[in-house]
Image (cartoon, rainbow, N blue to C red):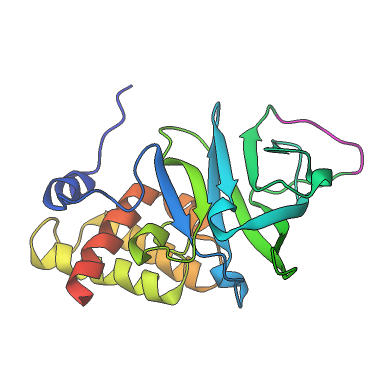
Amino acid sequence: MIKQISPLLLALSVVLLQPSAVTAQEMMRVSPTAPTNQQQVMTVKDWAGRATAIDFSAVHQRITSVVLGDSSRLVYTADVPLESGQASTLFLKQIQPLKFPGATTATLTNLLIKTIDAQGKQQLHSFNVVAAHGTPEYSNVQMSRTAAKTNSIAPTLSTPELLKRVEAGIQVAIARRYAMRDDPLFERVRQCTADARSGTPVAIAAKRANVSLALLLKLSQLGLQAIR
């Protein structure tokens, strides 16, 4: 069976000539600033058969400890042993599901990475990790103090500001006749944003509403242009 592409997504892909916020194999730069609430926890995706790197080299931080909430489907390793105090990059990789006696599992697990810089300042970084399938959007998440806003759309899409961009993108798409106002897809997108506003991670909210992350990214990109 051939999977159909949403006409709206196709239209947006043609109209938005600039590269999307996160493209295949692209490096995704994000700020290492600790989140102030649960909605700002960054989401990192790791694709089946691939590895995703979380790199602290650019901010000169070393990894001192790592905690993975659910290790039944994901494993990690560092560029050098953590005990050396010199590790700066963590690699995530999916595995076939395992069962550990007494262990719990979750659809969306979390990853905690503690780092230290040259001045001895410690920082705890919190991530949501999604075991993804399909075409990879990126393979390297680089922590950067100069992260561009457009590069942080995907991991922070659950924030009110960016959900506002998605909703603005819907209005622009309707005004430009990329799709009709009563398109069922718009209703599903609204369900997704409402779910995300209640605190549900966007990856989960999108899955519940049967909306692709690619469409959300295109709409947020369109909405960002309108807000500017």
Is residue 193 located in the magenta-colored stretch of the structure? no
Q: Residue at 25% of width from left, 72% of height from top?
A: 168
Residue nearest the observer in this picture, 184 or 126: 126
Is residue 189 shown above or below 89?
Answer: below
Q: Residue at 46% of width from left, 72% of height from top?
A: 159
The quarter of the picture where residue 219 lies is bottom left
Q: Residue at 76% of width from left, 37% of height from top?
A: 72
- x, y percent for residue 202: 48, 59
The quarter of the picture where residue 123 lies is bottom right
- x, y percent for residue 6: 24, 43
Report the residue that reaches farthest toward the right: 101
Is residue 99 located in the magenta-colored stretch of the structure? yes
- x, y percent for residue 90: 65, 44
Q: Quadrant of the N terminus?
A: top left
Q: Residue at 40% of width from left, 37% of height from top?
A: 25
Report the residue that reaches farthest toward the front: 118
Magenta part of the chain: 97-102
Instruction: Identify the main secondary structure in magenta.
Output: loop
Q: Is residue 97 visible?
A: yes
Is residue 94 shown above or below 178?
Answer: above
Report the residue that reaches farthest toward the top: 1
Q: Is residue 214 left or right of residue 39?
A: left
